């Protein structure tokens, strides 16, 4: 076989593998949600044993993603959390049916009897405004924070606007809360943690990265979004502010996951 023919054959084979992986990820991996249970030890934490459910990045855009969000909410609710945190990107982009889809996706929250707090993500600004979600969340008794502070479940929560598309002002929130000491900071994009001073919030919770969404078998992600390229997945305890990054529930771009299952997290927060 000539070198040119061999190269062509390898290219066709590589394309076939790529298409096969994409189809497998879209048909099977995107439908699976892993319940991740972690115990995190935090500095200056006054609520020892608090159990926080984390749901990020549902990217609701159609009937399938509405049902997928319902599965994520069911997983979270079954853990009986003390607090549930929603970390943004509720829509993929705003279109005429977007609000109705998001309302349907989060309708189960109307029957919850535990507190829920939410912040905006960058996609909540695509072709629209994240503020459009406020009346929906208020009707569901969800505390929606865009550069705001609130006490939820006895915990001071600092909700920062999207780093990529919003107008984030975390330092204003820190000034309002004695530097944020002992608080939870909720910020959709994890790389914003690098702008925070040490000794502030006990924990920052983020999503945005989808854990890389479509990974090689060796964990390499071919593309990561702005605002989520340094801290991709899991717990980073040794930063000036400890950070936990969720892989999220939905997808963006090609609706497929590979070696990167969707995640609902239950975090037990310990004092230490």
Image (spheres, rainbow, N blue to C red):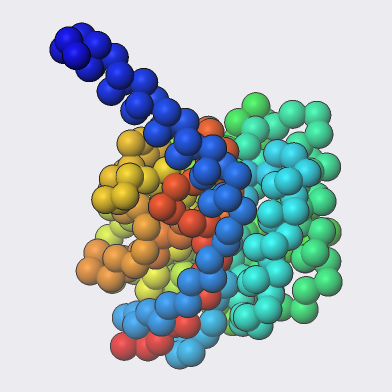
Q: Residue at x 34, y 82 (%)?
A: 41
Q: Furthest residue to the front?
A: 1
Q: Residue furthest left?
A: 3
Q: Position of residue 174 (x, y in %)?
A: 41, 62
- Counting from the top left corner in percent of width and height, residue 45 is at 40, 83
Residue at left offset 41%, top offset 59%: 245
The quarter holding residue 54 reads bottom right
Which quarter shows the N terminus? top left
Q: Is residue 75 visible?
A: yes
Left or right relative to 196: residue 213: right
Q: Nearer the viewer, residue 14 or 271?
A: 14
The image quadrant where one finds the C terminus is bottom left
Regarding residue 88, the answer to whether it shows in the image is no
| Closer-to-camera residue (211/113) | 211
Residue found 66% across the figure and 41% down from its top: 91
Work out whether 195 lies above or below 48: above
- For residue 201, above or below residue 80: above
As displayed, is residue 41 above or below residue 230? below
Residue 178 versus residue 120 in the image, above or below: below
| Residue under the point 64% across and 72% down | 76
Q: How many marks?
A: 0
Decide which of 185, 170 is in the foreground and name it: 185
- The image shows residue 139 at horizontal and vertical percentages of 83, 59
Going by the image, does 119 lie left or right of 179? right
């Amino acid at each position: 076989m000539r070198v040119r023919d061999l190269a062509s054959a390898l290219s066709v084979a590589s394309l076939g593998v790529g298409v096969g992986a994409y189809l497998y990820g879209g048909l099977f991996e995107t439908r699976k949600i892993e319940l991740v249970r972690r115990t995190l030890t935090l500095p200056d934490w006054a609520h020892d044993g608090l159990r926080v459910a984390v749901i990020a990045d549902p990217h609701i855009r159609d009937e399938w993603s509405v049902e997928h969000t319902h599965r994520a909410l069911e997983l979270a609710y079954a853990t009986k959390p003390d607090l549930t945190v929603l970390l943004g990107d509720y829509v993929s982009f705003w279109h005429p049916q977007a609000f109705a889809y998001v309302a349907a996706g989060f309708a189960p929250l109307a029957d919850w009897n535990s507190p829920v707090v939410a912040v905006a993500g960058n996609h909540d600004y695509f072709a629209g405004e994240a503020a459009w979600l406020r009346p929906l969340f208020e009707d569901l008794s969800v505390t929606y924070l865009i550069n705001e502070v609130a006490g939820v479940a006895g915990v001071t929560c600092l909700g920062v606007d999207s780093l990529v598309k919003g107008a984030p002002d975390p330092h204003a929130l820190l000034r309002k809360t004695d530097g944020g000491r002992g608080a939870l900071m909720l910020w959709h994009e994890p790389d914003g943690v690098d702008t925070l001073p040490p000794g502030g919030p006990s924990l920052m919770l983020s999503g945005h990265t989808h854990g890389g969404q479509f990974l090689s078998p060796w964990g390499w992600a071919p593309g990561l979004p702005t605002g989520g390229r340094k801290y991709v997945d899991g717990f980073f305890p040794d930063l000036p502010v400890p950070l936990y990054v969720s892989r999220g529930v939905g997808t963006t771009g090609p609706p497929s996951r590979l070696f990167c299952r969707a995640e609902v997290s239950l975090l037990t927060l310990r004092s230490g």
